[in-house]
Image: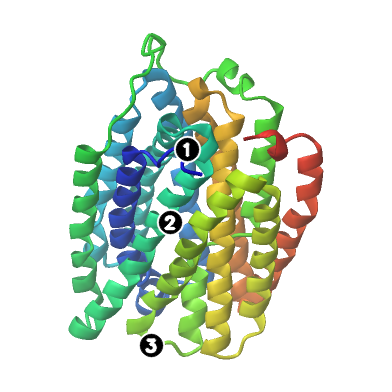
């Protein structure tokens, strides 16, 4: 056990960069759903469209940022561009005075996320030995999710102190700037062959062809799973409609994120030791359970249980899926692999969020969560077939 390699410094730096950016983002996102629905008068369908388009935009941009990071061997520079853009968008939220203005701010913020995501995830694989990649992705995801828990707690404290959403949103600018500084000073990119940097975009079919069948199966599995996972904004609105005071609305994201953070690193260790099957099956099953609880609960204690289980399912699946993508893709096209994977899952998430909003407006929140449970069960059902077909089990 003492011979096990240590988590590289760059992974820790990327993790703390994610932590501070998520503090900033979740200070905003913990309040944004109730701000849109309760203050600006947006419908659940509009909320689903806004969140779905925003996340899909991030995933589409990841395709190109991942490819560029492969072709030009500049992962850190792209990550800096993405985190920098996200920091610049934070002031747009307190300045927004309409649903359209919030949409534009969210859209720009997610472009920043899309630029940074694939190069960052590929950089983790670049600096980490294969035998500890699961732990490395788990650490980065855990730190990211700690930030996602701290941000809403800060938002709650500031709301209780100031009782003004716009003022609280201004405070979110500060941790975003800290995140950019950590990335700039703390991340070292390994030397890579830059001789390939001879052609500009677009992505070539040859790059995609190099990814192979195991990678394609991982993408299929991720996309089906994403269909079951609509935006967490619906968790906030569900709790607020059940009687949660506005000032405590960010607590929904904090509670979910604590469960997410607590389970991400152990899931990564288990992935390294036992493979992905158990973690994914458990995560898919937990999502179905969470959705059922959130559909039938008639009070805040029951909703809290569902929110915790939702967070646990995230911890068991997200780092594991990232490890599978890294293991299935050749190093030279790893950024492209993450980009295409995120594109597939992002488009699925867009469809899931729009469907969630439509179901909510027409038949109520129970219909939304029960549909999610059914789709999670479908993902669980196809998991054995994907594994038998030679996908995830062969990826180490």
Name the mark on residue 356: none
If you read the primary sequence from the N terminus, does the residue marked by circle 1 or circle 3 appear first?
A: 1
- The total of numbered circles placed on residues is 3
- When the figure is inspected, residue 195 is found, relative to residue 393, above or below; the finding is above
Question: In the rendering, which numbered label is found on residue 245?
Answer: 3
Q: Which marked residue is nearer to the observer: mark 3 or mark 2?
A: 2
Identify the residue position indicated by label 1 in the image.
Answer: 3
Of the image marks 3 and 2, the number of the one nearer the N terminus: 2
Compared across the picture, whether 387 is left or right of 342 comes to right
The answer to whether residue 353 is seen in the rendering is no
Q: Position of residue 87 (x, y in %)?
A: 24, 50
Give neighbour class at mark 2: few <14, some 14-19, many 20+ (Cα, 10 Å). many
Q: Which residue is mark 2?
A: 142
Disc 2, SS: helix
Q: Residue at x 59, y 74 (%)?
A: 361
> What is the quadrant of residue 83 in the picture?
top left
Residue depicted at x 65% and y 54% = 279
Q: Nearer the viewer, residue 136 or 96?
A: 136
């Amino acid at each position: 056990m003492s011979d096990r390699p240590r988590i590289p410094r760059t992974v820790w730096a990327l993790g703390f960069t994610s932590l501070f950016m998520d503090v900033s983002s979740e200070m905003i996102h913990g309040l944004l759903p109730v701000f849109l629905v309760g203050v600006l008068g947006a419908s659940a369908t509009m909320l689903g469209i806004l969140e779905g388009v925003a996340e899909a935009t991030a995933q589409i941009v990841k395709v190109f940022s991942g490819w560029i990071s492969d072709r030009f061997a500049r992962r850190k520079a792209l990550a800096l561009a993405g985190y920098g853009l996200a920091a610049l968008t934070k002031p747009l939220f307190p300045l927004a005075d309409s649903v359209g203005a919030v949409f534009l701010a969210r859209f720009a913020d997610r472009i920043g996320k899309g630029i940074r995501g694939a190069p960052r995830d590929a950089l983790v694989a670049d600096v980490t030995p294969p035998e500890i990649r699961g732990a490395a992705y788990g650490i980065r995801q855990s730190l990211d999710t700690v930030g996602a828990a701290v941000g809403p707690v800060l938002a709650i404290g500031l709301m209780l102190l100031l009782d003004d959403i716009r003022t609280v949103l201004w405070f979110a600018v500060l941790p975003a700037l800290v995140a950019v500084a950590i990335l700039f000073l703390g991340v070292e990119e390994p030397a890579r062959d830059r001789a390939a940097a001879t052609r500009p975009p677009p992505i070539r079919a040859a790059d995609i062809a190099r990814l192979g069948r195991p990678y394609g199966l991982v993408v299929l599995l991720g996309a089906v799973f994403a269909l079951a996972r609509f935006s967490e904004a619906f968790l906030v609105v569900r709790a607020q409609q059940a009687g949660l005071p506005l000032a405590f609305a960010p607590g929904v994201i904090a509670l979910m994120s604590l469960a997410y953070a607590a389970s991400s690193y152990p899931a990564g260790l288990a992935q390294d030791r036992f493979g992905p099957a158990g973690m994914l099956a458990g995560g898919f099953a937990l999502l179905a359970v969470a959705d059922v609880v959130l559909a039938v609960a008639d009070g805040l204690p029951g909703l809290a249980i569902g929110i915790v289980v939702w967070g646990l399912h995230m911890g068991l699946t997200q780092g594991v899926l990232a490890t599978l993508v890294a293991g299935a893709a050749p190093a030279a096209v790893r950024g492209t692999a993450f980009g295409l994977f995120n594109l597939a899952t992002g488009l699925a998430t867009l469809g899931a969020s729009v469907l969630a909003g439509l179901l909510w407006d027409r038949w109520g929140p129970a219909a939304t969560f029960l549909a999610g449970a059914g789709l999670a069960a479908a993902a669980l059902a196809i998991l054995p077939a994907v594994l038998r077909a030679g996908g995830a089990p062969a990826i180490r």
